[in-house]
Image (cartoon, rainbow, N blue to C red):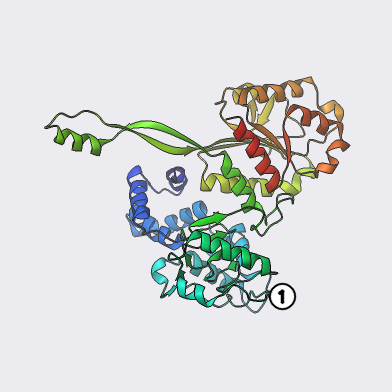
Amino acid sequence: MFTTLPEAFKKFDLAVDVRALLLLQRAMDKGLVRTIGDLFNVLRTFIIKDPEHMGPYTKAFYAYFLDINIRPNDRLNDAILRSQTFEQWKETNFGRIEDDITPDEWVNRFLDQVHLTHYDIKEVLDGRELWDKDKGDLEDNPEGNKDEALNRPLDRMADYSDLTLEELMQRMEEVKEQQQSEHSGGSHWIGTGGISPYGHGGGAKDGIRVGGSGGGKMARKVLGDSNFFPVDLEAILNDNNIDAALASLKGIVEETAHEILDVKETIEKGLERGGLFIPEIKNETFDKLQVLLIIDNGGYSMHPYIKSVQTLFRKMKTRFAHDLETYYFHNTVYRQVFTDSQRRKSLPIERLLSKDPNYHVFFIGDAAMAPYELDRASLNTYSEIKEHFKKVAWLNPEPVRYWNGTLSTQIIKELLPMYPLTPKGIEQAVLEMNRKK
């Protein structure tokens, strides 16, 4: 967990060793980390050795966990306001409501929620009592209700641990049938920022998280399928459905294991044997993920999609990836790819083919080009990549109905499995990759 954290914090001149990560894991195991605010406070105690490190620590934490990058001589508020994390938070919690709130006031609300700890929750409500009062047969207002959560701090929580998962799922199905619009701040509908047992961004212990990015670590189940996810899974990748696509990509995480010496067991068994210490070996499993992302960023036709693609895979790396490498090309891949987005630093294909064949390879591009560009060198390159890596997919942002309109797209589609660049298309690509494990 957080295997890339030491390297990320090192960029801010902060030393994070294995001991700090182990202490963080122990704190999480003991239930001391339930919110992002808890994580900020607990991790700080393991890293900060001098008060002057507090500024770099805050910058590192925001960059690593929230994708908020504070530039030199930059105001914190300005960095937050231009971040995608803040925009998504505002959209998720408040929609497009415009009022007299100043930008700095928006930032203060955002930070209040980011730094909320579970100790700030002043009232814990009985979920069973709320459940019994709510019969699940309310009539929805087509206009929805997003105003209720606007001025309410997240200072109360409902505990639904006394209810079974079957009860929650059955009631949620009933509510889903009645619901016609978005809701926030309540206790009944599938919404955000409230104490309903289903939704996200609120305070519901042992409820069901529907959508959203999580962070509170209180949900007992997370749903991301098309019956519940409040996004269009068939739409081309955009800011609104990135989390759905991320949920699909989690399917390529592979569990691996290696043997380690169990010191505690070795000592205990040795003492029982009267001092005969025989090494006790145990298997330790961990998630392993290796991805090569190869993006066509050369033509105007790809410009609308580059940001969303990079955001998706950056989120993937931050949340659960161990090894993600990004390369670039223009129109088609010949005998080289590029390590920088300006395509000035080339990497020979032979170097790419020397990598572990267990990498998952994603090409991102519309595959549309003049027929002469797709020459024999390029075709051979695709064949060699497919032969070496096995798990390869081409994600195309062009709607499927246009694929047969260009000869180059048809040819590449014959060489490499091609899927639409949508959450549903990514899910299909992942399922096919998993069949090849």
Along the horizontal axis of the image, is 373 left or right of 133? right
Q: Quadrant of the C terminus?
A: top right
Q: Indicate the secondary structure of the residue bearing disc 1.
A: loop
Residue corresponding to mark 1: 143
Along the horizontal axis of the image, is 116 left or right of 267? right
Q: Quadrant of the N terminus?
A: top left
Residue 419 % position (x, y): 73, 39
Q: Residues within 10 Å of mark 1 (few under 14, many from 20)?
A: few
Residue occupying the point 78% across, 40% down: 299
Residue 12 seen in this snapshot: yes
Residue occupying the point 66% across, 25% down: 385
Q: 349 or 208: which is nearer to us?
A: 208
Q: Amino acid at mark 1?
A: Glu
Along the horizontal axis of the image, is 36 left or right of 236? left
Q: 72 or 189: which is nearer to us?
A: 189
Residue at the extreme right of the image, as rendered: 405
Please say if 63 is above or below 202: above
Residue 96 % position (x, y): 69, 70
Total marks shown come to 1
